[in-house]
Amino acid sequence: MAQYVRVTEDESLPAIELPTETDGAILLSTLQAQFPGACGLRYKNPETDSWRGIRLLENMLCPPADEGWGCNLYVVVQKNDSTTKRKIEESPNAKEPESKMTKISTPDDGLGDLIVLGLPWKTTSEDMKEYFQKFGEVVMAEVKLDYGSSKSRGFGFVNFRDPEVAKTVLSQVHRIQGRLCEVRLPRCKQEFMPKKLFVGRLPDTTSEGDLMDYFSKFGEVIDVYIPKPMRGISFVTFASGEVAKKVQSQNHRLGSNLLNVNFAEPKSAKNAHMPSPTDMQPMASQTAMPGGWGGMGFDMYGMPGSWSNASRQNLPYNASTAYNTMMQSMMNMGNPSGTAANMMANRQGRR
């Protein structure tokens, strides 16, 4: 017969009763269904007032050996210092990976959006906004929902008008509707984001100072370069990849000119699709003259195989130069065939 065990996330919170299996153990999945991120249980020994851990064996939480589960109150052990950290992954029904949900902040946004992890499933955007309003003015509060079921995914974002308020929120512990939550900056991958922009269609009189003044209003600019002589182009490098992405996504006008702003493409990437001259030579010798000149299946003087593959690969890429070189070699050897001599004469005559 199943037994119910009292489990709570914190001793100050109401307990939840979890069912045991027929052998008296509790499935780890049963625990995690009510307490996402949980990895174990513990309880206090009434005699020593010390914590005792519950043995975890093959994803089964085994009852204490001496007295069984009894009437003890068991406290959830989280994976990271008793702080709930819901694992945010791309679910089969979800369409927004976390890297795409990170929103670009404007110069007035300060720290930008803060991510709130470990929200209770019942928490709505209004609930989260109501909680954070006690710290300061909230610009935006949103709980992320699953596309398929429209149910909470257990995390959300909040944005404050005052950057100092955001810093205060980051430094404190938060409990929303009885659940311990974590507030932090979203994981930023901007170190992999390009920060250098190409700016084209510049007015002829544009200076580096003009560009510095214009683009600095979007974020910190660490370098501005205008090639000489002036060709109407420049390169602007930002300190932040997110700022560069935001600038690239907008339209910009300097004077009467609508600027062309794109990410600067490295030279190595631009030329990656172009074969080098050394690659082109063997390709030309192998495709233009298979088995001999003109693809006739024989080499000089009708001797198959007299030229090695290495010799063919060393032929110049220019087919006309290669033809003249071969004919001249035949004539210099003192044994030019009549056909070869006539071909050489005809070719020189056409020129």
Image: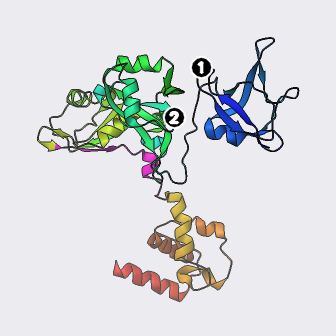
Q: Residue furthest bottom?
A: 338
Residue 33 screen position, x and y as percent: 63, 41
Mark 1, residue position: 12
Res 261 quadrant in image: top left
Q: Which residues are magenta?
A: 258-274
Residue 171 screen position, x and y as percent: 48, 17
- 199 or 53: nearer the viewer: 53
Q: Is residue 119 left or right of residue 112?
A: right
Q: Quadrant of the C terminus?
A: bottom left
Q: Label 2 sits on what residue type?
A: Pro
Up the image or down, 214 lies above or below 248; here it is above
Question: Which marked residue is nearer to the observer: mark 1 or mark 2?
Answer: 1
Up the image or down, 230 lies above or below 314; here it is above
Q: How many marks?
A: 2
Q: Residues within 10 Å of mark 1 (few under 14, many from 20)?
A: few
Q: Label 1's element?
A: loop
221 falls in the magenta region: no
Between the residue at mark 1 and the residue at mark 2, the CA separation in whole angstroms equals: 17 Å
Up the image or down, 92 lies above or below 206; here it is below
Residue 70 screen position, x and y as percent: 79, 28
Asked whether residue 240 is in view, the answer is no
The circle drawn on residue 120 is 2
Q: Residue furthest right?
A: 66
